[in-house]
Image: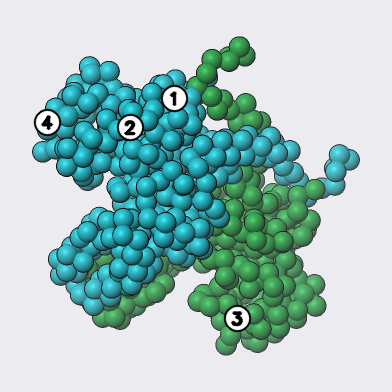
Chain colours: A cyan, B green
Amino acid sequence: MNRFCKAIGVENPIIQGPMAWISTAPLVAAVSNAGGLGVLGVGFAPDDFVIQQVAETKKLTTKPFAINTVMIPENLDRLTGIIKSINPPVIYADTLGELKLELCEKYFEIWHSFGCKVIVKAGDMETAVTAEKGGADALIVKGWEGGGHTAYEATTVLVPQAADVLSVPVVASGGIADGRGMAAAIALGADAIEMGTVFMACSDAAVHPNVKQSIVDAKDMSTVITGTSTGEPCRQFKNKLSDKMETIEAENVRAKAAELLRPVAESSLKLAMIEGDMENGAVMAGQIAALIKEIRSAEEIISTVLSDAQITLKQIVNFSFSGKESTYE
Amino acid sequence: MNRFCKAIGVENPIIQGPMAWISTAPLVAAVSNAGGLGVLGVGFAPDDFVIQQVAETKKLTTKPFAINTVMIPENLDRLTGIIKSINPPVIYADTLGELKLELCEKYFEIWHSFGCKVIVKAGDMETAVTAEKGGADALIVKGWEGGGHTAYEATTVLVPQAADVLSVPVVASGGIADGRGMAAAIALGADAIEMGTVFMACSDAAVHPNVKQSIVDAKDMSTVITGTSTGEPCRQFKNKLSDKMETIEAENVRAKAAELLRPVAESSLKLAMIEGDMENGAVMAGQIAALIKEIRSAEEIISTVLSDAQITLKQIVNFSFSGKESTYE
């Protein structure tokens, strides 16, 4: 049995990454109904929205799903109150800045006592190790090539380090949207994968159609990283907004750029995702958008990734490593 | 037979990436003698050094090796003269900025007429496609996680795009130092791999011992990218020099930062590689340094990567994709 599936209680080793305004109840339930782990992108949402989304998701699926939370100390008591009342099957804990061991130990124990599983997302090994020590049931390591808030290490280097060091199941995230990517993650030592961008181009996602089309149209070099000067770099499609942010970063010293960027970035995600403004909105997507060529249902995305990964693994076992003629070839 | 090996005439589908001051004759010959493709890192070296290095390499090996060149228009006539006189088996063409099709067509044809094979390194798909159209025998796509001059797309996303679009053999570069990384590259569609950083920590490399030790000591988050403001970003270990460069980039508008950085960066690579100054020198290495734990010979590196990759491929074909109990487990 797959270690990740066993630890979290899902059928397939696939997580749909949380995305604000995108991974709401319809997408999350569709992913979970397809045997993956749907994750509500409610890490920064108001309480009543979280409560409403969990209730709606429970109406649409009886399978495990997660809510996204952010490990910010001042959030966690309030959040724990909500978690107790709504009882989501899985907590998906995002990290921002340094992760404190005491915080993990305290809250993961409480959440576990409610019957919740806890998955933590990390962008570096120190965070990953702290989260495991603190009691996480599985660790996601997210590579720099992923969309939205991004870290500093690539998937190719994070996954094998996590596989070497951690005891809990390791989930590879960043740069994965198909069976080849899943097979590669498995080769690097992952037990499961997380995909975000491919679920933006999903017929089950309640996101503006322009957003789905922009993923299908994307090529390599379509994304840029904005907001480096703020210390919270973010990957999004290059457009009028990103050009404006880029100009601010080029023409100002860093501290001033950070100050000027905040009002520009504000509400820009919603402008893209809900209103469909592909030029002035922040279209946060990963580099893997270049490989996504069609809009499909969550069920189709998941079943195709799983079957293609299995086909890839069966094919590459016959890879020829040699420049010498073989009698078999 | 492996497509890359057949196209280039080598035994094993492994390239040692060119590194100035590091991949000189002893390392290059050791790699080629082990069945890989050694590459002299002489892209910016004076003519007499190139000529001397090729002569020395030919004394140490009878197997194919490459010289690194840079596709800068004003270089190519001079370079072609040298190539004609020294007749290296393979030309490894690095790209800087936009690659012109006419340039490829003209010079690749001349180099082919000398009996040389031509491999081109690209960091984006437009460059890769142009190089193939221009007559390249194989294409290396280098991910952002690699060391030294770096591109903007990660290995996980570049390799499958190249495999889908190109007809010539595809070589994955960036974030690879062991058998798992090679297996992952194969899953993504690569015919071969390039490794750089692991050959910095190689007993055959004529580089300062401090450099080799710094690779062994590296962890995740050890590298940073400097010189973004110059338009030629470069991955190197975080140290006094990179901190100084980082401060210049934070405290100045971009154009000014670029101007101030050039004299700071000058000669800093040699200072690290030859004099062993790990604080004031530019120690250009990839993120994968975190996975490299020992100093080994080129022969041992290559044979271990090949055998570990084969072991990985045989193991992962049995990967369990299911959360359901199997009667076989």
- Density class for disc 1 (Cα within 10 Å; few <14, some 14-19, many ≥20) is many
Q: Which residue is mark 4?
A: A77
Q: Nearer the viewer, mark 1 or mark 3?
A: 1
The one nearer the camera, A131 or A211, is A211
How far, Cα to Cα, is label 4 from label 2?
Answer: 23 Å
Is the residue under label 1 in contact with that under label 2 (CB below 8 Å)?
Answer: no
Q: Position of residue B1 (x, y in %)?
A: 80, 48
In the image, B205: left or right of B164?
left
Q: Are marks 1 and 3 on the same chain?
A: no
Question: Mark number for residue B49?
Answer: none
Question: Mark number for residue B100?
Answer: 3
Q: Position of residue B94 (x, y in %)?
A: 57, 70
- Kind of residue sitting beneath label 3: Lys
Q: Position of residue B187 (x, y in %)?
A: 61, 44
- Kind of residue sitting beneath label 1: Val
Q: What chain does badge 3 belong to?
A: B
Q: Nearer the viewer, mark 2 or mark 1?
A: 2
Closer to the chain start, of discs 4 and 1, is: 1
Q: Which residue is mark 1?
A: A10
Q: How many marks?
A: 4
Quarter location, residue A187: top right
Q: Which residue is mark 2?
A: A57
The one nearer the camera, A251 or A23, is A23
- Tell me what residue is drawn at x 49 percent, y 62 percent: A218
Above or below, B156 against B321 in this view is below
Residue A170 visible to an observer of this rendering: no
Q: What chain does badge 1 belong to?
A: A
Quarter location, residue B32: bottom right
